[in-house]
Amino acid sequence: THQWRGIIEEYRDRLPVTDTTPVVTLREGGTPLVPAQVLSERTGCEVHLKVEGANPTGSFKDRGMTMAITRAKEEGAQAVICASTGNTSASAAAYAVRAGMVSAVLVPQGKIALGKMGQALVHGAKILQVDGNFDDCLTLARSLSENYPVALVNSVNPVRIEGQKTAAFEIVDMLGDAPDIHVLPVGNAGNITAYWKGYREYALPSPATTPAGDASRRPLLPALATRRPRMWGFQASGSAPLVRGEVVKDPSTIATAIRIGNPASWDYAIAARDESGGFIDEVTDREILRAYRLLAAQEGVFVEPASAASVAGLLKAAEQGKVDPGQRIVCTVTGNGLKDPDWAVAGAPQPVTVPVDAAAAAERLGLA
Ligand code: F0G
């Protein structure tokens, strides 16, 4: 019986680790690539969802965090710090536990989803709510890591990007080639940077010394996968600095995960867009919520609002006639719906209460 071993073991030959690196893992990655029937019908394309909410802490951050905490451990760090809109902090807190390290997290006061706060708390993180937004938290985290004995595990740490690029590897391994288009929500812009790096590396010939063993267990697709997708990124309208071409001082959106006005990986995101022939656009909160409901009610995939920005963007592009039929498209849905269930409950009808009585229950269910 073979269990997925986590992204470092599965893609060891493509990651900055050595034989003696102490791997800290929760067996992240290996997430489902789910065919999206309704989205495929609507767009006339073959649409897949890369369901990153299936990672151990419920978001794609675990791919980067296994690398960041592993390398911090290797370098002897005893404490890690991050700024976060919630998911990074949940992931850092969990992986720090595995590594026997202390974690400190800086979150924007009142602007992170309850589920994510609960995760950081239960994993024992030291949490500071900062009287500011995510961008302020990141400035503070950077300053603390430069002046105190604590390692920064935000995506400005390049090994985070290394870990996250494995999602692109998995997609190529599963599909047999890169898709024509890859669609992502964009906040701090680390993930679009990582996917583009992953697709670029897989498009190159395999490393000269492809070791036997692990690598040989995978199909020999990388060498064949010479295509690269166009990268489409979507920001929330109230937090769309890359679309505006300038920093947004007071970002707003219901998708708190991507409520970011000054993305750290700005230049890399623009490079991914331009090198791939893609684009970065915005979607409104209303469009995000519509896609959020469609995903849950029609595809059976429950994601958090920020994740639905990718799908909202695809639908918007389709309505604008930007999606030629027949293409293969992957949308990453970045985080689990349970992170932020308020939006599932809001506006939904209250369940009715019935006595322990089959006839009454049948009647209320419309069966009788
Ligand atoms: N989707 C979710 C669910 C996220 O949590 C994030 C980022 C993004 C998309 C955007 O990814 O920043 O790489 O462009 N969350 C970070 C955090 C900022 O602190 O958890 P990005």
Image (cartoon, rainbow, N blue to C red):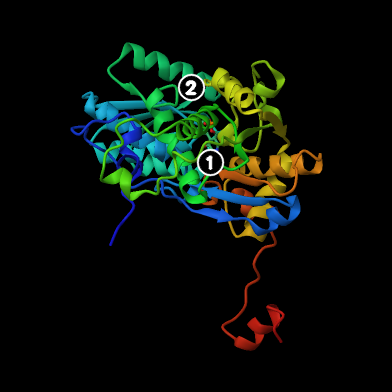
Residue found 64% across the figure and 54% down from its top: 295
Residue 294, relative to residue 201: is it above or below? Answer: below
| Chain-order first, disc 2 or disc 1 | 1
How many labels sit on residues? 2
Q: Say which of 245 and 258 sits in front.
A: 245
Quarter of the image holding residue 262?
top right
**Neighbour tally class for label 1: few under 14, some 14-19, many 20 plus, Cα within 10 Å:** many
Residue 171 placement (x, y as % from top left): 50, 45
Q: Which mark is residue 224?
A: none
Residue type at mark 2? Answer: Cys
Q: Does dot 2 land on a helix, a strand or a loop?
A: helix
Residue at 75% across, 43% down:
324
Q: Quadrant of residue 111?
A: top right
297, 40: nearer the viewer: 40
Decide if residue 342 is in sight here.
yes
Q: Please name the residue that numbered disc 2 is placed on.
A: 137
Q: Amino acid at mark 1?
A: Ala
Q: Quadrant of residue 358?
A: bottom right
260 or 40, which lies in front?
40
Q: Residue at x 27, y 31 (%)?
A: 17
Residue 113, numbered circle: 1
